[in-house]
Amino acid sequence: MTTKPLLQRYSQNPILQDSDIPWDCMSVFNAGICKWNGEYVMLFRTDSGPKDDPIPSLTRVGLARSQDGYAWEIEEEPVFDRDTIRLWLKDQYEARFGNEEIVRVYDPRITVIDQEAYFCFAFDTQHGVRGGIAKTSDPNLRSWEMLHISLPENRNMVLFPERVNGKLIRLDRPFPLYFNGGKESFDIWMSSSSNGTEWGDHRLLLASEEVPFANAKIGPGAPPIKTEMGWLTTFHAVEINHDKPLNAWSPHPWVKEYIAGLMLLDLENPNKVIGICREPLLRAETDYELEGFRGGVIFPGGFLLEDDGTVKMYYGAADTVVALAEGKLEDLLNSIELF
Ligand code: BMA
């Protein structure tokens, strides 16, 4: 029996690729997308440099705008790069470690809460991977106030679009490297905060072994959608298969398939997972998902509900382009197996 896929890929995918970018760009990665002042806005990551560099150090975060969520206009200048973070953290690092401390900024996410835009990002430093949160009410999304920087090792921070019981809620993906004998098996955690600056009440939300299509790590995807049944939220799940190397410019062999998944969290008590879709929400199939910097990577970063019940999922494909797939909220909710 074949069942209808939950999401249909946009026929004109990809929606963003290297040739669209007005600066030197090797590859476009997963992006954060939200609606802001009546438009769709996207913060996307680009990497520059040789294609075979396994960790390209020059990453930038650019801004694109769209009236309909399909056709995007890209602003000429990036919004963030490692120098933005260096400036923000000058007092912490510069006198002791010089300006080589911040290596790159990546995995942008954007959430609008109470008419303010919150930008979550990861950045690599010589002393660990940290997550950051900045916010703005600037309509042009150009001037930002830094709110919070996490301890290492944490990244893929994602904020809920509204406060729950008066608190800001955040999904996290820490790296417990010494757990499980050093095996990559990272999980999704949750934190909360009254002011966006101090975060606490850290809890394990979903463990990788609870996901039927992950044999390694999992992590948050896009900001959740509020529904009557609960918070519907995407995540990424990694399956490592050493016998089936995927196409990649680098590294070789590349064996990590990134798959999009879907789960439902309790409305009042979002640190409780109340259901999960047992099948992948989206798995790499098309050329633009299978070929590129790292083939087989589907990395959700935007998840938006339209008035007619359509859900748009924006995702990084093959760490090379940004793509879009759409489905119906009703079908997505029906796919969830409640516990
Ligand atoms: C993760 C992040 C993502 C990327 C993925 C696959 O660690 O860097 O941006 O899509 O790896 O390379």
Image (cartoon, grey):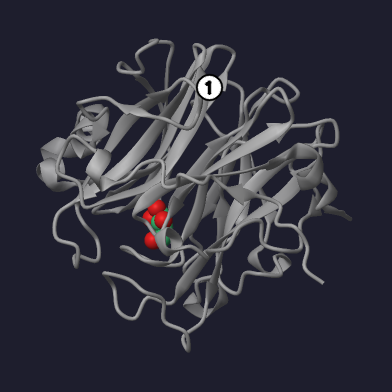
Q: Quadrant of the C terminus?
A: bottom right
Q: Residue furthest right?
A: 339
Q: Would you place residue 254 above or below residue 116 in this image? A: below
- Where does the image place residue 212, in percent across and percent down from the top left? 71, 70
Question: Is residue 259 left or right of 3 when viewed as pictured?
Answer: left
Occupied quadrant, residue 308: top right
Give whichever of 54, 6 is nearer the camera. Answer: 6
Question: Is residue 96 left or right of 237 when viewed as pictured?
Answer: left
Q: Would you place residue 142 above or below residue 42 in this image? A: above
- Where does the image place residue 313, in percent across and percent down from the top left? 58, 42
Q: Which residue is mark 1?
A: 35
Give whichever of 289, 127 is nearer the camera. Answer: 289
Q: Would you place residue 274 above or below residue 278 in this image? A: above
Question: Is residue 112 left or right of 44 when viewed as pictured?
Answer: right
Q: Quadrant of the N terminus?
A: bottom right
Q: Is residue 208 visible?
A: yes
Give whichever of 70, 147 is nearer the camera. Answer: 70
Mark 1 CB lies closer than 8 A to ligand 1? no
- Where does the image place residue 60, in percent across and percent down from the top left? 25, 39
Q: Residues within 10 Å of mark 1 (few under 14, many from 20)?
A: some
- Where does the image place residue 269, in percent across and percent down from the top left? 80, 36
Q: Amino acid at mark 1?
A: Lys
Callout count: 1
For ligand 1, the image quadrant comes to: bottom left
Occupied quadrant, residue 41: top left
Label 1 sits on a secondary structure element that is: strand
Give whichever of 109, 335 is nearer the camera. Answer: 335
Q: Residue at x 23, y 44 (%)?
A: 19
Q: Residue furthest bottom?
A: 243
Q: Is residue 109 visible?
A: no
Q: Residue at x 49, y 53 (%)?
A: 299
